[in-house]
Amino acid sequence: MKRLVVVSNRVADLSRSAQAGGLAVGLADSLRQRGGVWMGWDGQTLKYDDQPEPRIRKIGTVTQATIPLTEQDYAEYYLGFSNSVLWPLFHYRLDLVEYKSVFLDGYRRVNAKFADALTSVLQPDDIIWVHDYHLIPLAAELRQRGCNQRIGFFLHIPFPPPEIIAAVPRHRWLVESLLEFDVIGFQTNTDLGNLQHYVEDHLGCRMEQDGRIRIGKREVIAGCFPIGIDVDAFVEMAEKPNEEVAIETQRRDILGRKQIIGVDRLDYTKGLPDRLRAFARLLELYPEMRKTVALMQIATPTREEVEAYVEIRKELEALSGAINGRFADFNWTPVRYIHGTVPREALAALFRASQVGFVTPLRDGMNLVAKEYIAAQSMEDPGVLVLSKFAGAAEELREALIVNPYDVDDMARNLCRALTMPLEERRERQAALMKRIRKHDARHWLESFMAALERGETQHAA
Ligand code: ADP
């Protein structure tokens, strides 16, 4: 079996993998089993470049190879091109793109730096798997350095239609670089279809039914590999008694109150302001719901050095305050807004204790929270998932209540429907959804991508 080399912007902390999400755990397990390397940025920023070689740390069968970035790299490659150009653009938010030509220079420079570092650890028989939008030009950089190993790429975020991609400066270069990988994986068939449209409209190539694209003498395979979670691990976590959550739940039970839960990074793609407005609309449209339900929104701070993230935080704080000011009573707080992170064990227990999972991104690659909420439910008395049609997960999770995250009234009506849904219907939906998340779990994602990368097996568009 060939040695697997995983490359991503950041390296997961392998020594604490039990704490991390399904992806890191799944990848780490796979690396441990076959032996491998994980390469990425170590999270340090230096004033000047002074370390051309990656720092090597061996943890069991896995070798971690990390490099620092300079402050300039961090500003231009990470905050700049990755998170102020590609992130908003790939999430269909042209209005939030902030482009400077130095961002593109920094992006190319850091990808070259990754390629240099990687070249020093690569062996001829390795197989390489690169992750996400930070590293689209990496295969092209590696090829220029004579690397002819098989290289795969998985895009964790959406891939937008050609009209939107065309707003990226040097978009043709970007997509041509993407096509230097041997296998390109997307979360959904919509994303895959968008690549097909781009290569047909801008590059004059065809994508075959099975995802093969011929460019010059090379052949690339593109496919849809929806990412999943480790379902059993999450079920186990949700079933474990959690004292603090249990006390809180008992209190709610005595008062006969229900809970709607939202859990996200505090990102403008997650549709948080309209989610809060939809909850307020529920209380307006159905006054009988007042004092019977509360919304708990947990929002983890993220990328606070980018201006758009400062704005969204202010907006949410103002909105949750305004809703509470308007509706709260001395013994009922309608919105509990938590700007922070909750340990995974508590999160699983909170999901289980919440009657509605409210997941309404304006655009999302997949959205693992939706799958975690399903995994956490009990079959005796399951909650209901209310899910945005623009989450990648909506392509699979058809038994959720699917909503338009731009339509506050539609979300409010579906919240009401979820809160009043008969037990039998909840059970039917839960059973169907559970089957789906089990079918496309973390292991399936990993194995199907590796099959494409190692053996050229393709995924048929559904
Ligand atoms: P994204 O990758 O855009 O952040 P996902 O929903 O796909 O969105 O994955 C987010 C992961 O981070 C999930 O595993 C989720 O449980 C976890 N997470 C998100 N927000 C929080 C939070 N506030 N506290 C704890 N964990 C969180």
Image (cartoon, rainbow, N blue to C red):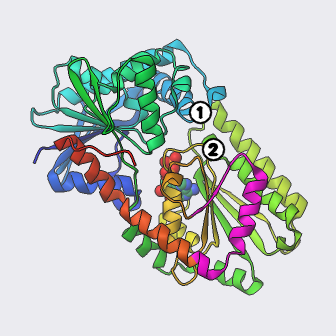
Does mark 1 have its CB less than 8 Å from ligand 1?
Answer: no
- Give the residue displayed 28% in from the left and 46% down from the top: 449
Of mark 1 and mark 2, the one earlier in the sequence is: 1
- Is 223 rendered above or below residue 435? above
Specify the label residue 58 is tagged with: none
State left or right for residue 462 relative to residue 149. Answer: right
Find the residue positioned furthest to the front. Answer: 209
- Give the residue displayed 73% in from the left and 87% down from the top: 254
What residue sits right under mark 1 in the picture?
Answer: 92
Residue 329: image x %, image y %? 88, 70
Q: Amino acid at mark 1?
A: Tyr
User: Is residue 268 shown to the viewer in this render?
Assistant: yes
* Pointer 1 local density, CA inside 10 Å: few below 14, some 14–19, many at least 20: many
- Is 290 rendered above or below residue 54? below
Regarding mark 2 in the picture, which secondary structure is present there? Answer: loop
> Does the magenta run of residues contain 418?
yes
* Pointer 2 local density, CA inside 10 Å: few below 14, some 14–19, many at least 20: many
Q: Please state which of residues 60 and 347 is positioned toward the viewer in this rendering.
A: 347
Residue 257: image x %, image y %? 74, 78
> Does the magenta run of residues contain 40?
no
- Give the residue displayed 63% in from the left and 52% down from the top: 360
Regarding mark 1 in the picture, which secondary structure is present there? Answer: loop
- What segment carries the magenta color? 400-426
User: Is residue 48 shown to the viewer in this render?
Assistant: no
Q: Amino acid at mark 2?
A: Leu
What residue sits right under mark 2 in the picture?
Answer: 362
Does mark 2 have its CB less than 8 Å from ligand 1?
Answer: no
Q: Are marks 1 and 2 in contact (CB under 8 Å)?
A: yes
Residue 223: image x %, image y %? 34, 41
- Is 331 rendered above or below residue 23? below
Residue 406: image x %, image y %? 71, 45
